[in-house]
Amino acid sequence: MIPVTEFKQFTDQQPAFRVLKPWWDVFTEYICVSMLMIGVFGCTLQVTQDKIICLPSHVSDPSRGEIDCQQFKDRSQNASASVRSLSPLPSPSSAPPHPGAGPQEGPREMSGLKNNLDIQQYSFINQVCYEQALHWYAKYFPYLVVIHTLIFMICSSFWFKFPGTSSKLEHFISILGKCFDSPWTTRAISEVSGEAQEDQNGWEKMKDLATLSKSRLNVSNVDASPAGDDTASLVHSPSVRSIPDKMVADKPNVSLMDKKEGEQTKALFEKVKKFRLHVEEGDILYTMYVRQTVLKVFKFVLIIVYNAALVPNIHIIVPCTLAVEDMTGYDSFCCNHTKAHLFSKLAICYICFVGVYGMVCLYTLYWLFYRPLKEYSFEYVRQETGINDIPDVKNDFAFMLHLIDQYDSLYSKRFAVFLSEVSESKLRQLNLNHEWTVDKLREKLQKNSQNRLEMHLFMLSGLPDTVFEVTEVESLKLELLNDVTIPPMVSQLACLEELTLLNCPVRLQLPALTYLRNHLKVLRIKFDDMRQVPLWMYTLRSLEELHLVGPLTQDLSRNVSLDTLKELRNLKILTLAKSNLSKVPQSVVDLAGHLHRLCIYNDGTKLLTLNNLKKLFNLAQLELVHCDLQRIPHAVFSLTNLQELDLKENHLTSIEEILSFQHCRRLTCLKLWHNSIASIPEHIKKLKSLERLYLSRNRIETLPPQLFLCTRLRHLDLSHNHIRSIPPEVGVLQNLQYFSASGNSLDSLPDELFFCKKLRTLKLGQNNLTALSPKVGNLTQLTKLDLKGNHLEVLPLEISDCSSLRLSGLLVEDNLFDLLPAEIQQQLKNE
């Protein structure tokens, strides 16, 4: 047996499809029901009543075999008179003359079979005449009505059952019902409008949008006043208003949704997005509906034509000829079709219904071909609700929304909430606020490299509003966040000075921009596309540091221009990393009056034109990294205030022009690491002010003694070269605190190295040393000693004289450490 639940599911399915049936489809359904009732009524008459009654008759024209039924037709005009005038059925003994005999003056004896079965005989005649003499249309008219009506009904529901359309329709109705009944549909617009009311006051309320039936509440809308004109970089949350519905009566009015409701609505947003992308690709639903309507029109024309032609064949009196003279004495009969009068009236009524049905179908075709059903605009929804970002839709999605509008426009209005990014972002915001509480955010606070209290948020769906309640945060780092809009609440972060955006586009509301313009000191932005660079950064007047990491190109006018950098009058540090610049941008030169540090980290693109560097007269630090430089740029020697120069990861092979650095009398740090330098010129001794020198990762084989005449050197890095020996002049560097010669080919060390008593870090790993001088004990300030990767057999006992050295700073093989006396080991282990 079929379970009752399956019947219930079937009965519940049809009402769900009614939302996709416009008024004409519903009207034609009622017409089909009326036509079906006509057919069923006619079929009932056919089954429950006699179909035909026959009486014997004379042949008026024997040569043609025509039966004279005129007497019956004349008498039928007066029923009572005809009944009295008709003679009783003749018996075989008193039967009328044989039709083939000539006229008789009086009754004659007939030769019929006498069997006393008159009733059975004429029942037989009635049945045979019904089958042979009665026109087929008069016999089968009720059944034709039933069949045609069923065909109409099937045509009307064909696209609901067709495999290519039924799945889309069922999915759409399922999503539509969830969207209509979702608590978020009721609260979304009111939540967003509540936020807008905090930003702007004085909005005027408008009249109710519509008054629904008693089963629905009134739909009221409030228009938001237009937002003020701001710069193109500002994005404000569009103002919206609430659309209450029947859910208001069932659920309490709360400002926030619980986590379960939020997750369900979030999943519903994703379903709506996927469904929209799926149904906007084609127009199979529209095509099937057109074909279905054309089929109904064709059926309507066919039925009207052949029914109008065959209705006159329904006669009340029907002549009939049967070869039953031997049995009854007659072979000609006049038959009365008892239901002919009723059937003719039913046929006329049926044709009228079909005519109305056809006119409705013709109107449907007119609506399909003369209305723009391939695109659906929510303009009226945007005007009435204030949601400005509801996208227009097209193809099958648009067609279904047009059908929904014919049923009830409230459905499409409520469905529009789930197409609005404002609504979705607000939902995401509420969920974020639930998940990221103030206490949870405080757990993420930690000090960054600039010693600021930093909050790092990674891969969230947005920026929680609770962030702005952690007022002690000094640095806000946002990485891979989606659709971030900083609200005016940022003004609560009184200590905020640094903002880091790593692949995280951020929009600012005007009050937030006003606050950050006056308080933000450091801005770090990492991007993959120049269009992600926010234009609002050029208005930050208090900005002191700007770090841009991304594919900046030389043709900046195509994407984002740096010409407005000159407005950043307090900017002191500018970093352009992973760029593809071939020259220093003119906008950077415009910062010459106040720029102290410039860092250009090219991504291998050769920096050709550097003459603009001469104009940066206040520049103290310059970093030209991975810029494919083969010589030290001459423009650098004109920077008299330069203190630090970094030329890392270029292709420098010779630094003979280093002599020109004597004009840069403030130069204290020179970084020439990660290049291809083969030798150090002797005139490096002219750099008397040099304190830090980085020459690691080059191809240096010998060190000139003049290098150690730079007596102010405190940091010297010669690691990972091809150096075989260190000159004894190294002992002149009495200020040396850091010395690294690891990764070379040293097999011995000069004793003079251990005269540098201020050494704190000594790195000699990955060499060929076989012994370490006992004079290492002179380095009483040594805190880090790297000897790993050499050929040492033992460590000198004088290492115990390095009073500041501990085990954590001693990098040697374990076996060498184990060979030390226990008291020395204990000394090194003591913190």
Image (spheres, grey):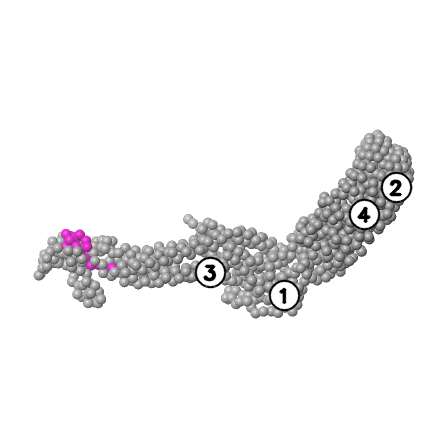
Label 4: which residue?
636
Q: Is 332 part of what is drawn in magenta?
A: yes
Would you call the spot at circle 2 few (<14 residues within 10 Å), some (14-19), or many (20 or more)?
some
Q: Nearer the viewer, mark 2 or mark 4?
A: 4
Horizontal and vertical percent position of residue 2: 43, 49
Q: Nearer the viewer, mark 1 or mark 3?
A: 3
Looking at the rendered structure, the secondary structure element under dot 2 is helix
Horizontal and vertical percent position of residue 816: 83, 32
Give the image quarter of residue 48: bottom left
Up the image or down, 109 lies above or below 817; here it is below
Label 2: which residue?
685
Residue 324 can be seen in this image: yes
Kind of residue at disc 2: Lys
Residue at image position (63%, 65%) is 226
Q: On the rendered structure, is 258 left or right of 643? A: left
Which residues are the magenta region? 321-337
- Which quadrant does the C terminus fall into? top right
Kind of residue at disc 3: Tyr
Give the CA distance from mark 2 to mark 4: 19 Å
Q: Which mark is residue 226?
A: 1
Label 3: which residue?
370
Q: On the rendered structure, is 504 left or right of 321? A: right
